[in-house]
Image: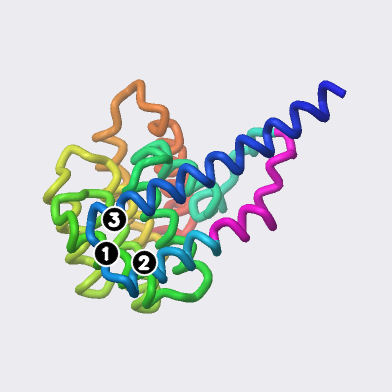
Amino acid sequence: MDRAVQLSEAALMGWLILLLIAVGASGAALWLRFPRPLWTMLGAALALGGVGYAWQGRPTLGASAPAPRPDALLDNDAISELRGQLIGRYGGEAAMFTAADALSRSGNKRTAVQIMLGAVGGDRTSVPYWTELGNVLFAHDGYQMSPAARFAFRRARTLGPGDPTPFFFEGLAWMRAGDFRKARVFWNRALELSPADAAYRPAIEQRVMLLDQAIRMMGE
């Protein structure tokens, strides 16, 4: 009986978290004065995220720590967890990140770009918004570091020179583009900027170590 109660509480907590994300995204869109078409797109993204949570989230399963593995470098769930540690999970910026990611992963890459252009237009000083704009532009442009994606990442780094977030995600983009050496430059910088007691530092440190191993194995 106790186990059943725990599972029910876990499921309820999962849906409450999803509700907080939806409220955060709506609040951010209202504050940023999104035009009506972008509201529709954002609503679709949040609905998509909810369906994905119901289908794949399996909130009633107990948590377990996965063993470190090389493919964790590009594991979407692990990256989402790290992103939450870097920028938070419940604010408007985190909600926009979640919505844009959901759209991009579902193939609606152009819509994801439009969502983030609207977010950046409403708050031109947001490091997370510029970072996510770089992410979705990278995906939209065939997973290549196009001039537009580079500009967005560079703008994020300029606005937040002491923030590891843009450095980490730009490194991730370079890695996905196949340039491991450039990825290492940005990940090393992200690690340097991570406080010793930061919850996300071990995850970045592990990725730097695995990336170094991959580079050595390939003889680069």
Which of the colour schemes (rainbow, by chain, secondary structure, one colour) is used?
Answer: rainbow
The residue most toward the right is 1
In the displayed structure image, the side of residue 35 where residue 219 appears, left or right: right
* 179 w.r.t. 71: above or below: below
Q: Residue at x 61, y 35 (%)?
A: 13
Quick check: marks 2 and 1 in contact, CB under 8 Å? Answer: yes
In the displayed structure image, the side of residue 133 where residue 111 appears, left or right: right
Tell me, yes or no, whether the highlighted magenta stretch contains residue 66: no
Q: CA distance from mark 2 to mark 1?
A: 6 Å
Q: Which mark is residue 39?
A: 2
In the displayed structure image, the side of residue 118 where residue 100 appears, left or right: right
Q: Residue at x 41, y 44 (%)?
A: 83
Categorize mark 3 by other alpha carbons within 10 Å: few (<14), some (14-19), many (20+). few
Categorize mark 1 by other alpha carbons within 10 Å: few (<14), some (14-19), many (20+). some
Magenta span: 49-62
Q: Which amino acid lies under the numbered mark 3 shown in the image of this protein? A: Leu
Quick check: marks 3 and 1 in contact, CB under 8 Å? Answer: yes
Q: Residue at x 48, y 68 (%)?
A: 44
In the displayed structure image, the side of residue 37 where residue 206 appears, left or right: right
Q: Residue at x 29, y 26 (%)?
A: 195
Q: Quadrant of the C terminus?
A: bottom left
Q: Nearer the viewer, residue 31 or 193?
A: 31
